[in-house]
Image (spheres, helix red, strand yellow):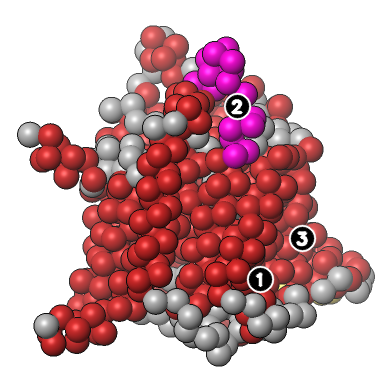
Amino acid sequence: MLIQQLVNGLFIGSVYALFALGYTLIFGVLDILNLAHASIFMLGAFTALVLVLKGVPLLVAIAGGALAGGLLGVLLDRVAFWPLRRRQAGPLAPLISSIAVGMIYVGAANGIFGPDVRHFPFDVVRTPTITLGQATFTLAQLAIFLGSLALMVALQALLRYTRFGAAVRAVAENPRAAQLVGIDLEAVYAQTFFIASALGAVAGILFALNFNAVSSVMGSSVELKGLAVIILGGMGSIPGSLLGGLLIGLSEDLSVAYLSSNFRDAIVFAILFLVLIIRPTGLLGQRGFRSA
Amino acid sequence: MHELVAAYHAHSALLNEIGINALLALSVWVTLACGQLSLGNMGFMAIAAYASVLLVTRGHWPFFGAALTGAAMAAAAGLLLGWPVLRLRGVFLAIATIGFGEIVRIFAINLPFTGGAEGIAGIPQLVTTAIIYSSLALIAFLLWRLTRSRAGRAFAAIAQDEVAASGLGINPAAYKLAAFAIGAFIAGYAGALAAFSSFFISPSDYSFGRAVDVLAFAVAGGIGSVAGPIAGAALLTLLPEWLRFLQNYRDVVNGAILLLVIIFLPQGVWSIVRRRSAR
């Protein structure tokens, strides 16, 4: 029982972590809390669903959803943040403009797909069950977990070892200085939005596959948990997102098992609240990717 | 005259909603005027709504006594919440207050006396449009007086630059806490008005989505004056009604208009009116 809960918690936690990476990346580079991220999570899932229903293989559909999510992220930056950057607006305006774009994206999904919950075809999500000791899980769940982990490792490597990663870290540290040494700020912002949003879209697809449900409101179930993840792990830290995601996933499943499912979300927010009061930098906050 | 009365009856629910949303927008505006972004106002609203409803339906209190007691409880919760979280800055404060709002909502679903997810039904309709608008007028007037007082100037100084403000002998922590408690009181009072002008309340009335809407009212209207949040609440409450014909696509246009306001009217929609009258 305990082992099974731990396994379930790790699976869902890895998806939370992947989703929260998008928050943390954009916050780290641009100091913006992007509240449209959950809507891209949802549109990524819808894109993959539409592709699968057209007969596209699942892996290609996931890539397609990631691409669509990335492009929606770049569009988001151009319409919601770029005009405000140009006139150096305060921190409040980008928060509201990201809410506005989130409304537009969710509204578009509502208009196109309607308010009903959609499902992937059964043969796409049905995978063999694996039993390991006391824990039972599906091959798909294992793939979701390993896929999320691989994407996070890839992102960390990208930021640490490539020229692009060095540029991102420089901009995160000090945009003006980065510009002075010849880094194209706007290009870095666009690429950051593309990567963060593509990861968010993949998280949405994996979340949808895990529960086999896609709906225009699915973003709201992770929107706030993603915030808990980055606060617990440490804002701007990629290993922090992973750790935070797994811990939030575990605490959810364990609180359902041992306390009461009614207070499951209260425990998540109580953790968020306590971390902010006791240690606002989060568990790994000091070692953010600015110094990756 | 008959047409006016008929129009009033047809739209009084919407009129009430505008008034209550205006009060909520003012509650988030007070903390913004002091440079603090709080998204916990739905939590304060819920505390006062449930408290006042229980006081009236079970304790047989009169409405105003119950509403003011509920609002005072919300303000006390604001002080308790503000004391630990007000040293957080910017989005961290916002996230902490989001967490508070969600915890209140989850407790509203699970406590034994709040009616669970279905909430409490059969609340007597004790609040009229006149009560809502006279409350709005009084609170707006008091807030306007506040902006012209020593405390109001201290709020503005803290919003501009907290370090510089404390250099001028202002105690930022005390003023921030005061702004927080005032905002919580107004949100709570609005919660009591809302509860007694609709037939029932449920935890879903106090969601994060609603907190975000209220913030949008204040910022889209303009946070430079007391009139801005009221104008923003009126516009953004009416807009979805006008856009009803778009059905499922309504939020696309709703969001687009909010986006245009934020990008092209940095001082909010109220700035248009101001500019006109200054001419």
Report x, y in % for residue B228: 30, 46
| Disc 1, SS | helix
Residue at the spot 70% in from the left edge and 27% down from the top edge: A287
The amino acid type of the residue labelled 1 equals Ala
The vertical placement of B118 against A280, above or below, is: below
Callout 2 crowding tier (Cα within 10 Å): few <14, some 14–19, many ≥20: many
The circle drawn on residue A267 is 3
The verdict on residue B171 being magenta is: yes
The chain that hosts pointer 2 is B
The vertical placement of B118 against A100, above or below, is: below
Report x, y in % for residue B181: 60, 46
The answer to whether any part of residue A214 appears in the image is: no
In the drawing, does residue A279 fall left or right of residue A114? right
Residue at the spot 43% in from the left edge and 46% down from the top edge: B142
The amino acid type of the residue labelled 3 equals Ile
Report x, y in % for residue B240: 28, 69
The circle drawn on residue B51 is 1
Q: Mark 2 near mark 1, Cβ–Cβ under 8 Å?
A: no
